[in-house]
Image: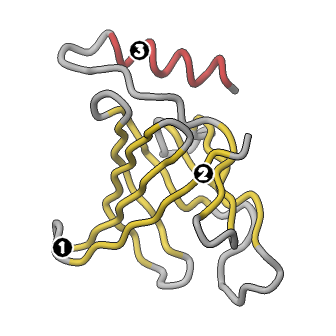
Amino acid sequence: MRLSLSLLLAFSLSIPGTVLAADLSGHWQRSNGQAQIAFAPCAGGQSVGVCGTIAWLSPAVKTKARIGDKVFYDLIPDGANNWKGKAYSPREGKTYAATLNLKGTTLYSRECLLGDRICRSETWTRIR
Protein backbone atom coordinates (compact mmCIF):
# COMPACT_ATOMS: atom_id res chain seq x y z
CA MET A 1 0.00 0.00 0.00
CA ARG A 2 2.72 2.46 0.88
CA LEU A 3 4.39 1.76 -2.47
CA SER A 4 1.19 2.71 -4.33
CA LEU A 5 0.88 5.89 -2.30
CA SER A 6 4.53 6.67 -2.99
CA LEU A 7 3.92 6.24 -6.71
CA LEU A 8 0.90 8.54 -6.51
CA LEU A 9 2.96 11.18 -4.75
CA ALA A 10 5.83 10.78 -7.22
CA PHE A 11 3.36 11.26 -10.07
CA SER A 12 2.00 14.40 -8.42
CA LEU A 13 5.52 15.85 -8.37
CA SER A 14 5.71 15.55 -12.13
CA ILE A 15 2.74 17.93 -12.51
CA PRO A 16 3.96 21.54 -12.79
CA GLY A 17 3.15 23.64 -9.74
CA THR A 18 2.40 20.63 -7.52
CA VAL A 19 4.08 20.49 -4.13
CA LEU A 20 4.55 17.18 -2.34
CA ALA A 21 1.83 16.60 0.22
CA ALA A 22 2.50 14.71 3.45
CA ASP A 23 1.73 11.00 3.74
CA LEU A 24 -1.80 10.34 5.03
CA SER A 25 -1.55 6.56 5.00
CA GLY A 26 -2.32 4.79 8.24
CA HIS A 27 -4.94 4.88 10.96
CA TRP A 28 -6.28 8.09 12.48
CA GLN A 29 -8.53 8.52 15.51
CA ARG A 30 -11.24 11.17 15.73
CA SER A 31 -10.77 13.70 18.56
CA ASN A 32 -13.76 12.33 20.51
CA GLY A 33 -12.25 8.81 20.36
CA GLN A 34 -15.40 7.33 18.81
CA ALA A 35 -14.10 6.48 15.34
CA GLN A 36 -10.95 5.59 13.43
CA ILE A 37 -10.26 6.11 9.74
CA ALA A 38 -7.71 4.21 7.64
CA PHE A 39 -6.22 6.19 4.74
CA ALA A 40 -4.79 4.34 1.74
CA PRO A 41 -4.73 4.69 -2.04
CA CYS A 42 -8.24 4.40 -3.48
CA ALA A 43 -8.93 0.91 -4.82
CA GLY A 44 -10.21 0.80 -8.40
CA GLY A 45 -13.59 2.10 -9.37
CA GLN A 46 -14.06 5.75 -10.15
CA SER A 47 -12.14 7.15 -7.16
CA VAL A 48 -8.62 8.47 -7.58
CA GLY A 49 -5.92 9.48 -5.13
CA VAL A 50 -6.28 8.60 -1.46
CA CYS A 51 -9.41 7.35 0.30
CA GLY A 52 -10.33 7.09 3.98
CA THR A 53 -12.53 4.28 5.22
CA ILE A 54 -13.98 3.67 8.66
CA ALA A 55 -11.69 1.16 10.40
CA TRP A 56 -13.28 1.17 13.87
CA LEU A 57 -16.35 2.57 15.62
CA SER A 58 -17.04 2.73 19.33
CA PRO A 59 -19.83 0.28 20.24
CA ALA A 60 -21.39 3.04 22.34
CA VAL A 61 -22.04 5.24 19.28
CA LYS A 62 -25.42 5.06 17.56
CA THR A 63 -24.74 5.78 13.88
CA LYS A 64 -25.69 4.76 10.35
CA ALA A 65 -21.96 4.49 9.59
CA ARG A 66 -20.41 1.04 9.29
CA ILE A 67 -16.85 -0.25 9.33
CA GLY A 68 -15.60 -0.22 5.76
CA ASP A 69 -17.66 2.82 4.69
CA LYS A 70 -15.62 5.17 2.51
CA VAL A 71 -15.92 8.61 4.10
CA PHE A 72 -13.03 10.45 2.40
CA TYR A 73 -12.26 9.96 -1.27
CA ASP A 74 -10.56 11.47 -4.29
CA LEU A 75 -8.02 13.16 -2.00
CA ILE A 76 -5.21 14.68 -4.03
CA PRO A 77 -2.21 16.76 -2.95
CA ASP A 78 -2.90 20.48 -2.68
CA GLY A 79 0.41 21.90 -1.53
CA ALA A 80 2.75 20.83 1.25
CA ASN A 81 0.86 18.93 3.97
CA ASN A 82 -2.52 19.65 2.33
CA TRP A 83 -5.04 17.51 0.49
CA LYS A 84 -8.36 18.24 -1.16
CA GLY A 85 -11.17 15.94 -2.24
CA LYS A 86 -14.56 14.81 -0.97
CA ALA A 87 -16.04 13.64 2.32
CA TYR A 88 -19.21 11.61 2.74
CA SER A 89 -21.34 11.72 5.89
CA PRO A 90 -23.20 8.42 6.40
CA ARG A 91 -25.27 10.11 9.12
CA GLU A 92 -26.59 12.79 6.77
CA GLY A 93 -26.19 11.03 3.45
CA LYS A 94 -24.42 14.10 2.04
CA THR A 95 -21.14 14.63 0.24
CA TYR A 96 -18.99 17.62 1.14
CA ALA A 97 -15.94 19.31 -0.38
CA ALA A 98 -13.06 18.36 1.92
CA THR A 99 -9.68 19.83 2.74
CA LEU A 100 -7.16 18.17 5.02
CA ASN A 101 -4.07 19.67 6.63
CA LEU A 102 -1.41 17.58 8.33
CA LYS A 103 0.73 19.00 11.13
CA GLY A 104 2.98 16.35 12.69
CA THR A 105 0.75 13.58 14.00
CA THR A 106 -2.40 15.72 13.88
CA LEU A 107 -4.72 15.87 10.89
CA TYR A 108 -7.28 18.64 10.54
CA SER A 109 -10.22 18.01 8.23
CA ARG A 110 -12.74 20.59 7.06
CA GLU A 111 -15.85 19.63 5.13
CA CYS A 112 -18.04 22.27 3.46
CA LEU A 113 -21.28 22.61 1.50
CA LEU A 114 -22.21 25.61 -0.66
CA GLY A 115 -18.64 26.79 -1.00
CA ASP A 116 -17.54 27.80 2.48
CA ARG A 117 -21.00 28.69 3.78
CA ILE A 118 -21.77 25.52 5.75
CA CYS A 119 -18.63 23.91 7.17
CA ARG A 120 -17.53 21.65 9.97
CA SER A 121 -14.08 20.69 11.16
CA GLU A 122 -12.58 17.68 12.89
CA THR A 123 -9.22 16.86 14.42
CA TRP A 124 -7.64 13.42 14.00
CA THR A 125 -4.57 11.89 15.67
CA ARG A 126 -2.33 9.34 13.94
CA ILE A 127 -2.39 6.07 15.91
CA ARG A 128 -0.39 3.91 13.48
The vertical placement of 23 against 125, above or below, is: above
**In percent of the image, x 39 and y 69: which residue is there?**
95
Give percent across and percent down for residue 4.
61, 21
Left or right of residue 38: residue 48: left
Q: Earlier in the sequence, mark 3 or mark 2?
A: 3
SS state under label 1: loop
Kind of residue indicated by mark 3: Phe
Left or right of residue 19: residue 24: right
Residue that badge 2 annotates: 125
How far separated are the C-alphas under marks 3 and 1? 31 Å
**In percent of the image, x 75 and y 66: which residue is there?**
67
Furthest residue toward front: 104
Task: Tell whether label 2 touches label 3 (CB within 8 Å).
Answer: no
How far separated are the C-alphas under marks 2 and 1? 28 Å
Q: Earlier in the sequence, mark 2 or mark 1?
A: 1
Q: Check residue 114 in the rendering and tell me which mark sits there, or answer none.
A: 1
Query: Which of 43 and 124 lies nearest the eye of the viewer?
Result: 124
**In percent of the image, x 56 and y 44: which residue is there?**
45
Kind of residue indicated by mark 1: Leu
Q: Residues within 10 Å of mark 3 (few under 14, many from 20)?
A: few
Left or right of residue 12: residue 54: right
Query: Which of 108 and 51 lies nearest the eye of the viewer?
Result: 108
Count of marks overlaid on the render? 3
Q: Earlier in the sequence, mark 3 or mark 1?
A: 3
Q: Check residue 11 in the rendering and tell me which mark sits there, or answer none.
A: 3
SS state under label 2: strand
Mark 2 or mark 1: which is in front? 2
Q: Check residue 46 in the rendering and tell me which mark sits there, or answer none.
A: none
Q: Quadrant of residue 79 in the image?
A: top left
Q: Quadrant of residue 31 in the image?
A: bottom right
